[in-house]
Image (tube, helix red, strand yellow):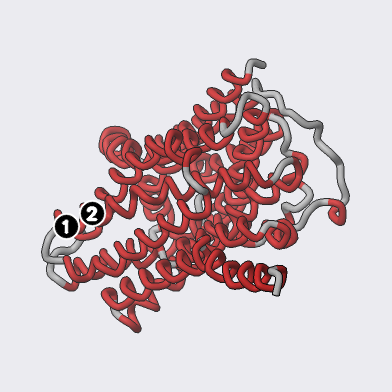
């Protein structure tokens, strides 16, 4: 298959599957509440989705090394379709309960833990032979396709729920993922799947240990994921505390989404020209500064949106820089493990942060939590970035020169 067609098929798959996933984020809680009559069940799917991701370093270690073709990834999406059908099929026959919701979450979570890193690795592999930094640019365009759904999906979902009810959206998501699987069937891989033993496949921690810059970048992504709750939950609670429930978080998310989309649109052109680790560290420092300042500007919705847009603009550049770092430092089995480590650390940290975030804000308050979360991101950006490492290396070089100099 022509590389351009393969790339187009993979980018379209990303857009279609994420559009469905973000749209059903609105519909699924409504269906769960209507079918079970219990509010606590509305979070079962989301909670169950995170479990396979958090444990994927163990159960997915050998599986991810077999995902080297579009056909193999299409099989993973087919399993995801089966998980997505559990709730709408159960609703059609009137048997949706907590077990169905948890089962749907576990199946789709396991498929997502494999398909996300696998698609990024295969896209990078396909681009490797087409020119320098093509892989980094195409991964940035893939991120743009993903982020564009943040703007398109919510209003589309709201309209669809109003017109036809939430259940139809669940059927539509399954159909969208099935379409993505069909597109991936047309994509050929660049390496034959290898039936390696678990002992012969690189462990995620070993890949990070062998690549210090990659370890620093993944650490930044993990801290960013862990503190994300401070932005979403923090602004929501600050809005309620100031008598404007929903307004602060909606302004922040709107600004973040707009800035993020602009950053993602420019990332394919900018990131190949910038140093990866410095670009990522700068983005994290900027986002941390945004978090820290937000509690001081809660009186202005415009300022909240502008600050959130600045932080949102930096994030696609940072993520594109991380993906570029993976593509230029790794290949083959190491590359697949590196993308899996990126997903595990970031997405797992997001899940943990959201799980514990309410309790943290309840103890410390929304404003102080945002300030501390911002300070944590600034600190990790400064420590993990390239600047301190260069400063530490300079005295060593100076001592070496003095030793070699004639006396």
Marks 1 and 2, how far apart at CA: 13 Å
- Front residue (pair 50, 319): 319
Upstream in the sequence, badge 1 or badge 2?
Answer: 2
Name the residue located 30 percent from the left edge and 50 percent from the top edge.
Answer: 256
Occupied quadrant, residue 50: bottom right
Residue 201 is left or right of residue 40, and the answer is right
Q: Where is residue 237 in the image (x, y as percent from the top left)?
A: 25, 69
Res 303 label: 1
- Which mark is nearer the camera, 1 or 2? 1
Res 250 label: 2
Residue 175 is left or right of residue 267, and the answer is right
State whether residue 81 is above or below residue 305: above
Q: How crowded is mark 1: few (under 14 residues within 10 Å), some or many (20 or more)?
A: some
Q: Position of residue 27 (x, y in %)?
A: 37, 45
Occupied quadrant, residue 166: top left
Q: Quadrant of the C terminus?
A: bottom right
Name the residue located 36 percent from the left edge and 59 percent from the top edge.
Answer: 287
Please tell me whether mark 1 sits on a helix, a strand or a loop.
helix
Q: Quadrant of the N terminus?
A: top right
- Front residue (pair 44, 116): 116
Confirm whether residue 20 shows in the render: no
- Front residue (pair 361, 102): 361
State whether residue 95 is above or below residue 165: below
- Front residue (pair 201, 238): 201
Occupied quadrant, residue 56: bottom right
Residue 398 is left or right of residue 19, and the answer is right
Q: Where is residue 12 in the image (x, y as percent from the top left)?
A: 50, 27
Name the residue located 69 percent from the left edge and 45 percent from the top edge.
Answer: 330
Residue 44 is left or right of residue 251, and the answer is right
């Amino acid at each position: 298959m022509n590389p351009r067609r393969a790339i187009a098929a993979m980018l379209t798959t990303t857009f279609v599957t994420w559009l469905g996933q973000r749209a059903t984020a609105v519909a699924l809680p409504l269906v769960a509440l209507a079918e079970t009559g219990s509010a606590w069940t509305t979070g079962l799917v989301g909670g169950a989705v995170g479990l396979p991701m958090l444990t994927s370093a163990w159960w997915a270690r050998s599986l991810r090394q077999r995902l080297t073709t579009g056909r193999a990834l299409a099989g993973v999406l087919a399993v995801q379709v089966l998980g997505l059908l559990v709730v709408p099929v159960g609703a059609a026959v009137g048997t949706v309960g907590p077990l169905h919701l948890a089962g749907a979450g576990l199946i789709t979570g396991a498929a997502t833990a494999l398909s996300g890193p696998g698609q990024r690795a295969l896209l990078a592999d396909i681009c490797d032979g087409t020119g320098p930094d093509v892989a980094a640019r195409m991964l940035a365009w893939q991120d743009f396709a993903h982020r564009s759904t943040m703007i398109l999906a919510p209003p589309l979902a709201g309209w669809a729920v109003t017109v036809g009810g939430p259940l139809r959206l669940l059927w539509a998501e399954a159909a969208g993922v099935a379409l993505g699987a069909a597109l991936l069937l047309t994509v050929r891989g660049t390496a034959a799947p290898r039936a390696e033993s678990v002992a012969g496949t690189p462990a995620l921690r070993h890949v990070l240990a062998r690549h210090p810059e990659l370890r620093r970048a993944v650490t930044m992504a993990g801290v960013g994921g862990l503190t994300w709750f401070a932005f979403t939950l923090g602004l929501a609670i600050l809005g309620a505390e100031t008598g404007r429930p929903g307004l602060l978080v909606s302004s922040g998310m709107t600004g973040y989404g707009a800035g993020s989309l602009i950053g993602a649109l420019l990332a394919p052109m900018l990131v190949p020209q910038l140093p990866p680790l410095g670009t990522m560290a700068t983005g994290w420092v900027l986002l941390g500064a945004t978090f820290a300042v937000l509690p001081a500007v809660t009186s202005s919705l415009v300022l909240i949106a502008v600050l959130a847009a600045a932080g949102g603009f930096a994030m696609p550049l940072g993520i594109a820089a991380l993906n570029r770092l993976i593509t230029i430092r790794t290949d083959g089995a190491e590359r697949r493990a590196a993308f899996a480590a990126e997903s595990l650390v970031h997405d797992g940290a997001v899940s943990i942060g959201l799980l514990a975030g309410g309790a943290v804000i309840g103890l410390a308050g929304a404003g102080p939590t945002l300030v501390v979360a911002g300070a944590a991101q600034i600190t990790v950006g400064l420590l993990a970035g390239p600047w301190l490492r260069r400063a530490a290396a300079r005295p060593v070089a100076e001592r070496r020169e003095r030793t070699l100099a004639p006396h």
